[in-house]
Image: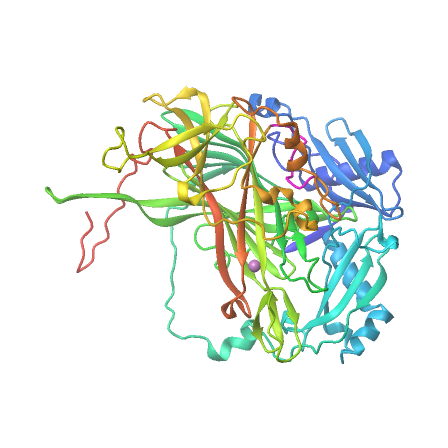
Amino acid sequence: MTAIYSETQLATQLPAASHPLDPLVAEEILAAIAIVKAERHLSERVRFITVTLQEPPKSVVLNFQPGDAVEREAFIILLDNQDGACYEAVVSLTQQALRDWKHIPNAQPPIALDEFFDCEAAVKASPEFQAAASKRGITDMSLVMVDPWSAGCYGNEPETDRGRRLSRALCWVKDSPTDNGYAHPIEGVLAIVDLNSMEVVRIEDHGVVPVPPESGNYAREFVESRFRQDLKPIAITQPEGASFTVEGHEICWQKWRMRIGFTPREGLVLYTVGYEDQGELRPIIYRASLAEMTVPYGDPQVQAYRKNAFDVGEYGVGMLANSLTLGCDCLGEIRYFDAVMSTSRGDIFQIENAICMHEEDFGILWKHTDWRTDQVEVRRSRRLVLSFIATVGNYEYGFFWYFYQDGSIQYEVKLTGMMNTSAVPPEVRPKYGTLIAPQLYAQNHQHIFNVRLDMCVDGMNNSVYEVDTEAVPMGDENPYGNAFYAKSTLLPTEQAAQRLFDPYKARYWKIVNPERQNRMGYPVGYKLVHGENGLPFSHPEASVTRRAGYTTKHLWVTPYQPNERFPAGEYPNQHPGGDGLPTWTAADRAIENTDLVVWYTFAHTHVPRAEDWPVMPTAYTGFMLKPVNFFNENPANDLPPSPAKQSAQHKCH
Ligand code: NI
């Protein structure tokens, strides 16, 4: 469940943080808000869009010893509803003082959760909207759903829209209170809402298209009469408990060590990920998170061409996280973590059980049968799962990190929920989508993700190589034509490191520490292993491509800068484009043997299917990080065999 409460319920004494990377607790969030309110004499019209930990410098984190005093700071993004101005504040919680305050010109902060509700209410109350709805036979406003889509920036907006904080809301209508409204788009009607004043600026009516008549229900009350009857229970039991230990936000599992955090924008954040190898804790990643995602739709029609949500930068997947339920979302011995944030009104917004951690059996990790002696050695793979699930309007995204016993790390996004829909007149077959019910279609679109990986493979200074597999020309060196080898090319600067995946060369990128070798003299490294990928189908000059420039390359590498956090910039909402990675990397800084950040882009292209309706079976996309000559041998060779179960037919060895 989620809970909202305010400062009256809280003590005045701030609890001491046990580590510099611990997320802010409720008392700290409220104290930060109170300090900035008092010092800036803020009116009730100033909103607190996000209040997060101002992460301390790496040197503070890396030199920290348990028991050391922790300096705490909060970073706050504020929005003044009166004049639309955006501010950033840094508050010292230790000194109880405002450290920094600045106006950020031409910036639109992300859309806050409470703006969703206010926007829907404003549209439903608009006489102009009611008139447009009535033209379509819709009179009961309680059945109308309004999704506050971000407005983007196209350059064709009326002059009066400029500088305003806008949503271009799309609307649906339900048959009944629990009906799936996405089966019934109110086609042709767009509500343009000023989110500062909650004024409906105008209703655009592009002509009546009948509301698709058929229901698209998936909820239990609509399906239970045909529930399948032949499922036997599966129980995951760990009679001695799970194999991980948790202290505060630090996690130990097998040889893995890491810390976790949570922000309203990125959701789950991993810090100081390392693997204990023969008594030495070897660092791999300093910080990892989903830094941006963009969902461009491919339909040029008037109601759809602006559909391209930046779900991290415009909405915040952390703020939209679900409160998870044991046995439904997660199976087994689960450890949950809550997420604590602020509402835009300055109260505490707490999501219980936002992060799920558990272990999963993952089949066979390795096996060999010695066919001469009949000796069988097999070890089962187990992985540690850290995840959260966000509901962004119609879609659900599950964001999963997996840690394996052989030193591999996997990132997986699980896409499910509801497709976004539009209506067409009877007999029309749309080119840019798929009919999923009479007069109802789902549009072609992509989900493009970027994960920021602040790497520290065996130390702070790393280099990145591109590795292509090359066939050798026939000749003296390759007389039989069979020879191929792995060719490593150093990527020395930011421009050189803007790369695309090439499956025909089995291309991968490896992040190495050039100053440390394994026992055979290879630099220790981790390689980025591709899953599904692709390129954006939007043109280079399209608004969404300019705004999401990061989507045009699969790999970007930058030297670490604490203020370079998000690949489409700090404030992508209504931004004209060019910010973030394309701007920073224009300097073409050196990235060799230095503290560097790897940004990996991966795309899932979704041409809708009948089977994705009325609710989408989960689609999976992501990538892996695998050790490459990081260890001297298979680090999971030391796994004990699993106890064999006796059964009449089979005997395990
Ligand atoms: Ni999709």
The residue under the point 64% across, 36% down is 581
Q: Is residue 145 magenta?
A: no
Image point 20% across, 50% down: which residue?
Answer: 652
Asked if residue 504 lies left or right of residue 183, the reply is left
Is residue 567 highlighted in magenta? yes
Residue at 89 percent of width and 48 percent of height? 82
Of residue 150 and residue 229, the one placed in the foreground of this image is 150
Please give the name of the residue rendered at 54% of the width and 67% of the height, measured from the top-left corner. Answer: 615
Against 57, residue 254 (above or below) is below
Asked if 417 appears above or below 99 in the picture, the reply is below
Q: Nearer the viewer, residue 71 or 197?
A: 197
How would you classify the magenta stretch by its main secondary structure? loop
Q: For the magenta stretch, what is the residue range?
A: 560-569
In terms of image quadrants, where is residue 173?
bottom right
Provide residue 372's location: percent of width, then percent of height: 10, 42
Does residue 217 appear anywhere in the picture? no
10 or 338, which lies in front? 338
